[in-house]
Image (spheres, rainbow, N blue to C red):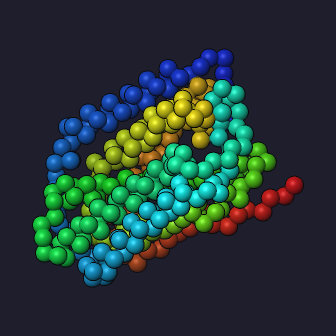
Amino acid sequence: MFNKLLIYGERDRTLETALTTIFVLIASLIFLYYSNIIFVTPDLNSLVKSSYFSEEVLAIFRSICALLSIFTLSWVALDPKGSPDYPLYYVEKKNRKRDSSGITRLAAFTMWHFGLFGITFIILATISWINLSGNEVPKWMLISGPILFASTYSCAILVSSIVTYFIIDDQVSRGNDIDHLFYWYEIVMHNFNVIILGIALLINNIDIDWKYFVFPIIFGILYVGWARIYAHFAGVYIYNFLDPRLNGGPILHLILLGMITVSFAIVMLFRLIVDWNYPIAIIIISIFTISIIRIRKPEIRN
């Protein structure tokens, strides 16, 4: 049934897909406006304290995470060797190999979410260092810190799950080479993302409000808009399931938005379990994280 959504029907579904996405965006913005969540300032201690580590250790951990994002994305953009991928060519409506290098490689959602990962830890690290210096942390940082963390973790779960359970197997079924999906930086962005964020959730005291769910949805919709712009100029969709012309275009977009909402619900659940029982939280987060990562390249039989 799912495969029927990924084919082109007699009619272009771009209009229906666009209207569906715009409706969800407007609904999200209306909810954001009436929730007043961006005007609620979290408690400072929830952002700078850890029940198990000193503020200095927490600040260093956050700084290392921020540097990891900067280094990884810089490598991706500046590595002259580049990497092959198999995007969907807009005119041909077919996936075929492309040798990609340079800044255009940052167009993928994987890189977008890892950029969000970096911004999150830059903000959180800055909050920690400002507080340690004895200065007052700006209000906008206090508000944005937990929002960014919840959004980043939600997107990371989505990325790791799709890569592990769809993209790798899809590429294998097409007979494509998947070596590039296991380069060190791909492993970092597809696997270490959720590992690090799981650790961060366990050692941080960040409070996550259920109303934050709207932010990863908006972030996802922004990427959908960017994917259309990129397809116009580059002539390809990096992810074939984002082509709005597909027979199941509207449904696929709703499925993705539903998945990112479920991802947020998982993050929210993890936060509640951490508060309830720390040892059990470690076990549950570890098992879940292991289940959605794929560090070893699968064996391919001809």
Relative horizontal placement of residue 30, taking residue 159 as reference (left or right): left
Quarter of the image where one finds residue 25: top left
Task: From the viewer's perspective, tell me whether residue 68 is left or right of residue 169.
Answer: left
At x 26% / y 37%, what residue is drawn?
31
Give the camera-side residue of 289 and 168. Answer: 168
| Location of residue 35 in the rendering, given as x and y in whole percent from the top left corner | 21, 42
The quadrant of the rendering that contains the C terminus is bottom right
Going by the picture, which residue comes out furthest to the front? 80
* Residue 241 visible somewhere in the drawing: no
Q: Which picture quadrant has residue 69? A: bottom left
Q: Say which of 92 and 221 sits in front.
A: 92
Occupied quadrant, residue 217: top left
Question: Going 70% across and 37% down the picture, which residue do you hit?
Answer: 95
130 sits left or right of 20 in the view: left
Find residue 4 and report its horizontal and vertical position in percent.
67, 31
Above or below, 72 against 203 in this view is above
Residue at the (28%, 58%) spot, across then down: 146
State whether residue 163 is above or below residue 5. below
Above or below for 271 versus 94: below
